[in-house]
Image (spheres, rainbow, N blue to C red):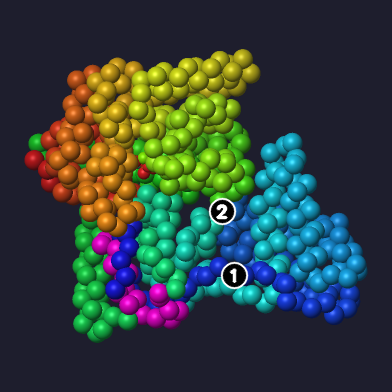
Amino acid sequence: MLKGIGASQGYGIGKAVIISDISTDYSNVKYTDAEAEKSRLQAAVDTFINETNELAESLKTNAGSKESEILEGHIAMLRDPFMLSQMQESIDSGIVAEKAVDTVCNMFIDIFSAADDELTRQRVSDIRDIKDSLLKTLLGAEGVDISSVEENSVLIAKDFTPSMTSKINKKNVNAIVTEVGGVTSHSAILARAMGIPAVLSVIDATEKIKNGEAVIADGFNGNIILNPNEEQIAEYNKKQSEYIGEKENLKAYMGKESITQSGIKKAVYANIGRPEDIQNVIQNSAEGIGLFRTEFLFMDRNTEPTEEEQFEAYSTVAKAMNNKEVIIRTLDIGGDKDIPYLKIEKEENPFLGHRAIRYCLDNPLLFKSQIKAILRAAVYGNIKMMLPLITALDEVRKAKELIEECKTDLKNAGTNYADTPVGIMIETPAAVMISDILAKEVDFFSIGTNDLTGYIMAVDRGNAKVCSLYDTLQTPVLRAIETTIKNAKANGIPVGMCGEAAADTALIPSLVKWGLDEFSVSPGNILLTRKTICNCP
Ligand code: PEP
Ligand code: MG
């Protein structure tokens, strides 16, 4: 048995499909003659265009026109006679098709990276994608096509990027397993948003699990059973059907209010990472968005999203939620959330380092472009702004000054915007200790138990020797939660929780008793959270 972190609930029983990194090393390819190399190149280009066309078509129906436009852009670039003729000329100078592709694409990457305007710089990731695909086709290095794996597959990879995840066909994939990541990593959040069981941080999973091997992935406790016997398969089939039965029963809570037995109304909100998650949120009848993790908009690309792109994303969510509350958290990077192009320096202790609000306050241009996008989007719905990882009053005051500056800039430019309430995450022991003071400065609190538990218990949950101490139900963490709620209430501001513990059925009765107003959970946990609240006295 292998052990990892159960990061998305459910049981996945099926055949392992290993998604390994594919080598694009062409050092052993021999040059024959220019004509032969050119026709290999042309064949690879034709294959690329055909496959990309097909993918764009299917994306149009499955995801949306935005995603398919990106792929259509790839085709247009490769159809550009200049790019292809450069590659052909390189071949004439006596090099193999692979090297011609590599050299010409790298030349474009260098030119585009140095461009002044952001749109051109963003083309760099497109050229990288094109280069990679052409090299793989030329080398015949077929990777696993994630979109067309057989039914009952369990996908095993080092990690899943959002673009890999977007290719997953839910009908055929019973679970995903990765070598890195935790409950709050992007692969976990995406898996939960899609309702696929996931076990993450399974050391050397891609080597220890064989392609085609039967596996059971337990998304609750993180166990991976290899080559299960009949008894184990029967046990897990039973667990799976019970789990599905429970989920069916929960549908009775769809569209209902979250009211305790004594008639106290609570709010069950959802956590999202991308506008695409909204569908799942609405399907599960969330009463609002309690946490929009905006860092996902910054991932899987080579440059930061523009103010315009962010405005588009935030206003789309605000409109889709139809005047229900949407709490947008400003950029929370660092710690385990690296965004390479932001060039955050390597640190000895990244969780105690230059992350989240600390990074944003030191990079006001980036921060202000996000704040402006949020203020502009607020015209289209019921948006609140939330600051992550607060440890000091001064950070809140500085952020509020920047927000005021943004409003003045927008006003002077004649741009439409709306004021938003400003709240903070309580996810450090420091913020808990001064929560009485902070409550006088902000409009709301949201308790981030994912980080708070780690900081209070002084435990690195990725370290197997100590991770058993990472437990939100430990008394010190419970006291911190109770104190925060008490101080919010005493100062008349609403208090929610957007860490994973908000969906913990063992904790919910205490949270209700202490007076927590809003529970923000993964879309798949909305109904169980509502049911638990409705059963509270
Ligand atoms: C938290 O720390 O509880 C939280 C919700 O933020 P994140 O998981 O994104 O760090
Ligand atoms: Mg956090």
Give the crowd class for mark 1: few <14, some 14-19, many >=20 residues within 10 Å.
few
Q: Residue at x 49, y 32 (%)?
A: 359
Q: Does the residue labelled 1 lie within 8 Å of ligand 1?
A: no
Quarter of the image with the N terminus in it: bottom left
Residue 390 sits in quarter: top left
Give the residues in magenta: 208-226
Query: In the structure shown, which secondary structural element does the residue marked by tag 1 occupy?
Result: loop
Q: Is residue 257 visible?
A: no
Q: How many labels does the image show?
A: 2
The residue at the point 15 percent across, 49 percent down is: 506
**Residue under label 1:** 22
Was residue 445 drawn as part of the magenta stretch in this picture? Answer: no
Q: What residue type is labelled 1?
A: Ile
Residue at image position (87%, 64%) is 90
Pointer 2: what residue? 64
Give residue 462's position: percent from left, percent from top: 34, 53
Q: Distance between the residues labelled 1 and 2?
A: 28 Å
